[in-house]
Amino acid sequence: MSETPEYATAEAVSGVALEVDGLRRRFDQLDNRLGPVEAWGARLDAIEQQLAETVEKLRQLVTAPGQSTVASWLALPEDDEQAQHLMAELVAWLQTVFLRYPDAAEVLPDCWAWHPEVVEELLWLMQAWSSAYFDQAGGVLRVADWHDRYRPGVVRRLSARAGKCSLENHTSPAGAPVAPLAESAGQLAEWWATSRRRPAPEPSDEQFAAAAPRRTRGGMRR
């Protein structure tokens, strides 16, 4: 990792956008100059070509397959290199920014990286911070919003979801979550697509039986 890591793709896009703006300003300056247009022909052609190449780089950054200006840990492709890169950026940002706030340091458990939902919260918060401070569209109001709403909101949710967790709770980790009664989703999709003005299908005995383990663990009862 470089000494000054990019915290999000949005920062790279912002850099290219600034380059585009600089080229536009050069055009404006040329328009204000006196003298024959022919004298500036070659220079204008070179700047126009550079502008076209810069805009294409910007387009590729935004629309490249598999790329997004907002990275998601939960939707991340199964790519170890990409995951390692994002996690390294996040750790650096946690140490540089997030953990400087005492309330944040208090609620972040030792096992935070064992919680994909916690990593997701921290990752988007990092990207929101980067966007507010470094994007061309950022500014003091977006920075204020990050401090006033986004950061406290994440700290509050971390405290509620994982603030009391510890490494001991991960000695027998559970598998990936499974949507309840996923095999019945198709039936409900068909009802919604074709008959949503009518009542939904009643749950079958088989569906009640499949849901029984969750219901006995404190889920909703009929």
Image (cartoon, rainbow, N blue to C red):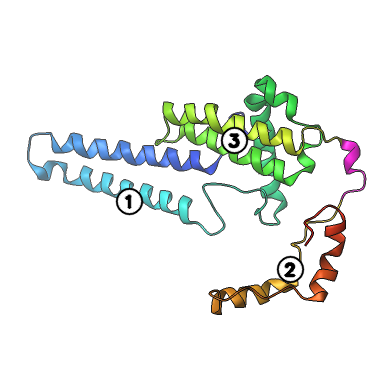
Up-down relation of residue 211 to residue 204 (above or below): above
Q: Position of residue 115 (x, y in %)?
A: 76, 43
Residue drawn at the location 53% of the way across and 51% of the way down: 68
Up-down relation of residue 134 to residue 81 (above or below): above
Q: Earlier in the sequence, mark 1 or mark 3?
A: 1
Identified by mark 2, the residue type is Ala
Residue behind mark 2 = 182
Q: Position of residue 30 (x, y in %)?
A: 17, 37
Residue behind mark 3 = 126
Up-down relation of residue 9 to residue 201 (above or below): above
Q: Residues within 10 Å of mark 3 (few under 14, many from 20)?
A: many
Tell which of 56 and 127 is nearer to you: 127
Identified by mark 3, the residue type is Met
Dots 1, 3 in contact, CB < 8 A: no
Tell me which segment is drawn in magenta.
Answer: 167-173
Q: Residues within 10 Å of mark 2 (few under 14, many from 20)?
A: few
Mark nearer the viewer, 1 or 2: 2
Dots 1, 2 in contact, CB < 8 A: no
Q: Position of residue 101 (x, y in %)?
A: 65, 21
Residue behind mark 1 = 52
Mark nearer the viewer, 1 or 3: 3
Q: Position of residue 23 (x, y in %)?
A: 29, 39
